[in-house]
Amino acid sequence: MKELISKISVASGFLILLSGLGWGLGFVINEYEILAKEHEGLLPSNQRIALESCEDGSKRVVRTFAVQKAAKDIPILTYHRIVDEKDIVKKHYINGKVNPMIVTKADFKKQMTYLKDEGYVTLSLNELHGFLTRDISLPEKSVVITFDDGYKDNFIEAYPILKKYDFKAVNFIITGAISNKVHPYTPEHVQYFGAKELRKGCDVFEYQSHTYSFHKREKKNGVKTSYLLSKSKDDVVNDIHTSIFQLGGERLGFAYPYGEYSPESIKIIKQAGFSMAFTTEERVASPKDHMYEIPRFQILYNTSLQEFKKLLNNDKDL
């Protein structure tokens, strides 16, 4: 079941995207609100993640492509957890169904194989930014692969497949959840990248902010609301700048937790120096989009290969 997204138009022309209250989302929220099994607390706010050997996304060279037919829009795909089917256990279920934010390793491999076989180019954020600002042309078969949160299984299960196909991807990480130690992979638990794994994976992944510790919700006026909307402006600014510091100053892209944001959120992200920000609105991205309201498709447990193909083809009949 796909996550429902409530959209509220505001006078300024901005859009507040509120992620839905579907059965799967409630379970995912619970996962987001606890740290990985090995954590005793957040990565200290004054401690950077050692990523010196990794190239910042904002410094990646924009490639020159031979463009026979230029892309008018680009699908951006979003994943969360990638888990081998054999490792799925009771903890991965809610109301008798697998958490929809989990994609099996087998399905992920089929999807990536399809992209490879069809000749898709996987873009860096710098290349996407150039396209959205109309500075560069890109091949019609271009796609951006993103992951949210920085789960350890992204490195264990997804990374080898992406590397095999020489694909690039973006990982929006909750920086405070990163561990300085590498712990054994236990897929039944919620685990995040270790710093060493981040470094090993940066030939495929570029890392951007998904907050320091504000990927949480609290009740405000009786409704569960993202910290980006419920906390004071000063607290939100401090959290965002902590994540930037821990990423060594990288601020090319930001992903709104739960897809929830407001005009004030956009202002904060813009003033923090981010070049673009990503929502959970499900449609293709084009130069017509606001740079701080870039849409993405959610790839879920029940996303069939046929549905996956339709997303890439702008929902055309195949």
Image (cartoon, helix red, strand yellow):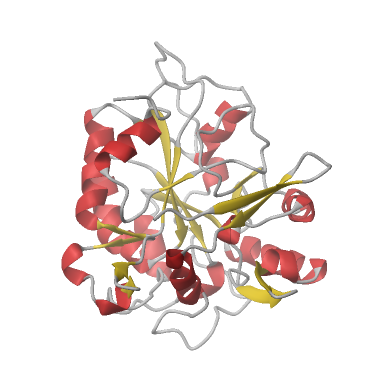
286, 309: nearer the viewer = 309
Q: Is residue 62 left or right of residue 315?
A: right
- Vertical relation: 298 (above or below) 101: above
- The residue furthest left is 86
Q: Position of residue 93 (x, y in %)?
A: 31, 73
Q: Quadrant of residue 316?
A: top left
Q: Position of residue 200 (x, y in %)?
A: 34, 59
- The residue furthest top is 68
Q: Is residue 17 left or right of residue 66?
A: right
- Vertical relation: 246 (above or below) 126: below
Residue 165 in sight here: no
Labels in figure, total: 0
- Vertical relation: 304 (above or below) 42: above
> Quadrant where the N terminus lies?
bottom left
Residue 167 in sight here: yes
- Vertical relation: 118 (above or below) 6: above
Q: Position of residue 52 (x, y in %)?
A: 49, 59
> Quadrant where the C terminus lies?
top left
Q: Position of residue 78 (x, y in %)?
A: 44, 49
Q: Is residue 296 left or right of residue 80?
A: right
Q: Is residue 48 left or right of residue 184?
A: right
Residue for point 74% across, 54% down:
262
63, 146: nearer the viewer = 146
- The residue furthest bottom is 40
10, 108: nearer the viewer = 10
